[in-house]
Amino acid sequence: MSTTVHRVRHGGEEYRVVKAGPRSGRAVMYDNEWSLDMYVDRQAAASLAVAWGLAARSRRTLVYVPLKAGREGPKSLDDWHRSPVALDLVLAHHSLGFPPSRWKAVRGRLGPGRPHTVEIPENEFSREEHFDHHRRLFAGWRDELRFDLAAHTLFLTGSATAFRLSGALLHSLTTDGPARTLEYPGSHECVTLEPDQSSGEWPPRGGPSQVHIQYAHGWKAA
C-alpha cells in the first residue's frame, strides 16, 4: 500500500505519522452518537487491514486513515444512516501514549510527507484462528482496543495483539464479504469492534459503544 510518512514536532515531542488512506475502493465512517458505522468495499477493506497490520508492527507510529473526504455512503443506505458527522481514523499502539487532544494540532502540521510503500503479508491476519480466547477470562487481560474521539477522528489504541485480532476480522471482509453476497444477494456482511471494558464504564469514557463495519457490495454513490 502507498503511504506518506510525516515527522511532526508538537509540545516538545516528535511524532511519526504514516498517512495510509484507502486510495482505491471506498470507505466512510459516520458517528451515530451511540455507535460508529463504517462502510467499506472490498478494496478499502484490504487497505484498512494493511493499516491495522502496520499499527500492530509500528509501536512508535500514528497510523492516520483519512475517511472524511468520502462523506457519501452507499446509495442503498436509509436516510437515518446519513449522519452529518463523518470521521477520520487514527490507529496507535498504546505504549506510544499519544494524547488524542493533540491530534488537531499535529494533523495541521503534516505537510506533504515522504512517499513510502507498506507491505503486510497475508498470514499477518490468520493468527486470530489460533488465538486462545480463554485468555480473556484472566485478570490482567489488556489486549482490547480503547476508543477515543477527538477532532472528528476516532482513535483506536491497543496492543499488537489487539490490532492483529481486530485486523483479522476486518481482513475477513475481503473474502467472506464478496463470497457471501454473491451466494446470498442482499445479505448483511459485517464485523463489530467493541472497546476495552476494563474501566467498568459503558460505554467507556463516554465514547461510542462499538464500531460496526459493513461490507458494501457493488457500492454506488448516493
Image (cartoon, helix red, strand yellow):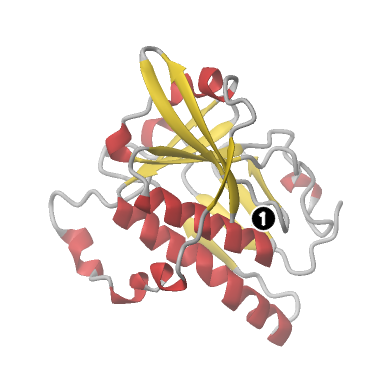
19 or 139: nearer the viewer: 19
- Residue 76: which quarter of the image? bottom right
| Identity of the residue drawn at 42% across and 27% down | 15
* Relative side of 75 to 101, left or right: right
Q: Position of residue 86 (x, y in %)?
A: 68, 37
| Identity of the residue drawn at 46% across and 44% down | 209
Tag 1 residue: 39
| Identity of the residue drawn at 55% across and 21% down | 104
| Quadrant housing the N terminus | bottom right
How many discs appear?
A: 1
| Identity of the residue drawn at 70% across and 78% down | 181
116 or 101: nearer the viewer: 116
Q: Secondary structure at mark 1?
A: strand
Q: Residue furthest left?
A: 139
Compared to residue 31, the image places residue 15 above or below, namely above
Q: Position of residue 172 (x, y in %)?
A: 52, 71
* Relative side of 85 to 101, left or right: right
- Residue 61: which quarter of the image? top left
* Relative side of 201 to 24, left or right: left
Q: Residue furthest bottom?
A: 183
Q: Position of residue 191 (x, y in %)?
A: 52, 63
Q: Position of residue 126 (x, y in %)?
A: 39, 74
- Tag 1: Cα neighbours inside 10 Å, few (<14), some, or many (≥20)? many
Residue type of the residue flagged with mark 1: Tyr
